[in-house]
Image: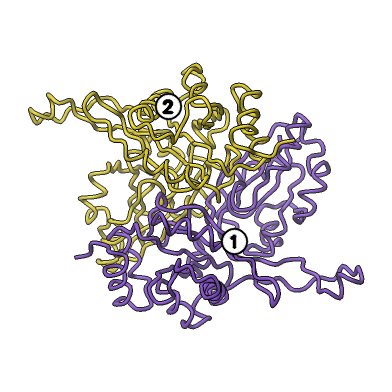
Chain colours: A yellow, B purple
Amino acid sequence: MFYIIGLGLSDEKDITLRGLQAVKNSTRVYLEAYTSILMIEKDRLEAFYEKSLILADRDMVETQSDEILRNADVEDICLLVVGDPFGATTHTDIILRARALKIPVRVIHNASIMNAMGACGLQLYNFGQTVSLVFFTETWKPDSFYDRIKENVGLGMHTLVLLDIKVKEQSEENLARGRKIYEPPRYMSIPTAVSQIIETEESRQENVLNPDTTLAIALSRVGGGEEERIIAGTLRELLAHSADAYGQPLHSLVIVGKRLHHLEVDYAEEFAINRETWRNIAKDVYKCALE
Amino acid sequence: MFYIIGLGLSDEKDITLRGLQAVKNSTRVYLEAYTSILMIEKDRLEAFYEKSLILADRDMVETQSDEILRNADVEDICLLVVGDPFGATTHTDIILRARALKIPVRVIHNASIMNAMGACGLQLYNFGQTVSLVFFTETWKPDSFYDRIKENVGLGMHTLVLLDIKVKEQSEENLARGRKIYEPPRYMSIPTAVSQIIETEESRQENVLNPDTTLAIALSRVGGGEEERIIAGTLRELLAHSADAYGQPLHSLVIVGKRLHHLEVDYAEEFAINRETWRNIAKDVYKCALE
């Protein structure tokens, strides 16, 4: 059996009992490298599972799937991924390959940002499509995310914005020279994300977002206990807020849609940089029926 | 500390290690009654946790929250819920009440249908808002879900349709006489859902859905291992399919949006009632670039 096992959001204790059992019974255990780079260290997982783990970067999962799947028809093999196996990064290719090889596959689900974002107090069923925001450079500022947010905003839906992660990046020089030397990983922070979003609004000028009256909620390390941060405010307030306040990566951002319920406002008020502007904008701009 | 702990999708082994630890350390453990009615039996959980559980129905969670929260400032108390604490049923009220009482709250996340629906092979980020479908009666056929699906369809987004659950329902006679006698629980099945959706399209006639060319994917007991069923086809095919094939409740339905990627089509083809119609409609009606 080939298992793809979600590790959940934070550390080694977020695996499910079902997941742990599969790990214990497996002859080879792969850890998707994103995972270890992000929140959970490989050593700590190995000690906890009493198993050695084989690191598998994205390339390996995509191009060497036959090696990962080797003998999975007769042994249990598992691939550990952060969040849920069907989160932002999907594992469609390797599952299709397993099917072609007639290897049975079992997915063990877990929390991912795609449902844990509910921690910000907004109702999950009022979220529209999810968008991804990549790092802008001087010459490359892809803004298709703006069109997607516009669609959600038009319907009054909330939008989850996933922020860029750069791992195994090569500098232009190293790339040109074919040197496999990688830059340190980079994770987009809330201030960078908000400033890119405001920059895009300023260049597109389609009045989708207004820095002073669009509400948003910053999420960091959701499910990470003491490390979790949830901070709410206008885009301008989030940008002006102390960068340190957002804590360690990963960060995500939620753009609040107009279809806003007063309980959502009450719940998220706890996270507001300025409770008064939070409530006033909800009432006056979002037309939310607050007491 | 007051813990709200997601139990995940299927049985007692879907709790996370972090969740189990909190259960073990708690002096009182409440089980939201929906949970036990659905997938996991109370006795089985009690044996597994070596703890007795207090059943809490929806009413109790909403109106007797102070009893649930009693002493949670000095002891650990937990409330177990199916899926994730911020799933379709939210726990906003009890968390707001805990805050008012200055009781620290910790949420332990888990998988819910809101992210595990990725098992059908469609990308989570292309889902629009989620809709709920309630049982129609002769005189009451609420169709606001149709407007929501129309909005998603207009943008090419996929739609998760959550199907009605009726628990603790009273017959009209028992209600009139004030007798607290409840009908057996009812769960909407895929054939009922699809027939209500087609009925609504026929009465509204806004060409949002076409029984013969709208693709949909039925999900039953996602994450439930051998009990999981995923079946794909046109609305008409799903309706004509053997009702038994969908297995035990809970069922959910995904309406496939036009923004469809060929990998999504390939992945879900495995689940198709008729692979040929699945691919042909994806190609000809959805204009998906298949080989």
A134 relative to A60, above or below? above
Q: Which mark is residue B144?
A: 1
Image coordinates of residue B73 in percent, x first then y, are: 77, 31
Q: Is residue B210 left or right of residue B164?
A: left
Find disc 2 in the rendering and name its residue.
Answer: A194
**Residue A209, picture quadrant:** top left
Q: Dot 2 lies on which element?
A: helix
Q: Quadrant of the N terminus of chain A?
A: bottom left
Q: Nearer the viewer, residue B171 or B10?
A: B171
In the rendered image, residues at marks 2 and 1 fall on the same chain: no
* Residue A97 rendering spot, x and y as whole percentages: 26, 61
Question: Mark 2 and mark 1: span between their CA atoms?
Answer: 34 Å
**Among all residues in the image, which is located at the extreme right?**
B177
Screen quadrant of the C terminus of chain A: top right
Vertical placement of A197 versus B241: above or below? above
User: Does A125 sit above or below residue A160?
Assistant: below
Residue B81 shows in this picture:
yes
Letter of the chain that mark 1 sits on in the rendering: B
The answer, for residue A113, to whether it is visible in the render is no
| Amino acid, disc 2 | Val
Secondary structure beneath label 1: helix
**Dot 1, how many residues are within 10 Å of its Cα: few (below 14), some (14-19), or many (20+)?**
few
* Residue A231 position (above or below residue B22): above
| Residue at screen point 30% across, 58% down | B261
